[in-house]
Image: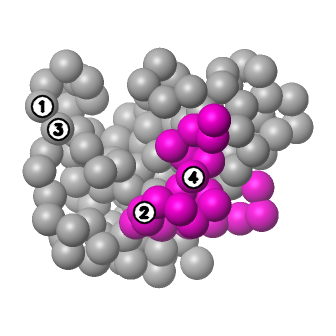
Amino acid sequence: MASLFSRIVAGEIPCHRVAESEDFLAFLDINPRAQGHTLVIPKQEVDYIFELDEPTYARLWAFARRVAVAVEQVVPCERIGIAVIGLEVRHTHIHLIPINKVGDINFERPPLQLEAEVLANLAAQIADVFA
C-alpha cells in the first residue's frame, strides 16, 4: 500500500506545496510544530533515509537546503531546525522547522492549529521565494 506521502505525490491527497522538482517535493506539515514547518520528501517511496542511494541522498539534502532558505526568508526565526525521525510515516522525510530556541522542535508538545487559509497563504509566500 502506498504511503501517505506517495498519495500526496500522486495528487490523491491535497497538500500545501512550497517547492517541487522532478524528484522531490516540499509541503507544509498539517500538524506543525511552528509556523512554516515544512516536510521535504523524495517522490520515490523509500522508507528509511539511509536506504536512499547516495546521489539521491545528496540531492535531497541540497533541495532541502534551498527550501530552508526560502522558509527562513518568509518566517521570522533564529534559524531552521532539522529533524529526521522517520517513524510516523514510512516514507523518507526531512522536517524543516523554524526555531528560536531548542524547545521549538519538541515533537512531544501539541502541534499548532493553523487554519487552511493561513497554511495556503504561507505556502504561496514560500513558493514565491523558492522560485
Sequence-first disc among 2 and 3: 2
Sequence-first disc among 4 and 2: 4
* Residues at marks 3 and 1 touching, judged by CB atoms closer than 8 Å: yes
Sequence-first disc among 1 and 4: 4
Looking at the rendered structure, the secondary structure element under dot 2 is loop
Q: Amino acid at mark 2?
A: Cys
Q: Amino acid at mark 4?
A: Arg
Q: Amino acid at mark 3?
A: Pro
* Residue for badge 1: 110
Q: Is residue 2 left or right of residue 124?
A: right
State the separation of the CA atoms marked 2 and 3.
17 Å
Image height check: is 20 above or below 92? below
Range covered by the magenta-colored residues:
1-23
The quadrant in which residue 9 appears is bottom right
* Residue for badge 4: 7
Give the class, few, some or many, for how many residues have Cα within 10 Å of label 2's Cα (few <14, many ≥20).
Answer: some
* Residue for badge 3: 111
Looking at the rendered structure, the secondary structure element under dot 1 is loop
Q: Tell which tag, 1 or 4, sits nearer the viewer.
A: 4
Sequence-first disc among 2 and 1: 2
Q: Report the quarter where the N terminus lies.
A: top right
* Residue for badge 2: 15
Q: Nearer the viewer, residue 127 or 43?
A: 43
Give the class, few, some or many, for how many residues have Cα within 10 Å of label 4's Cα (few <14, many ≥20).
Answer: some
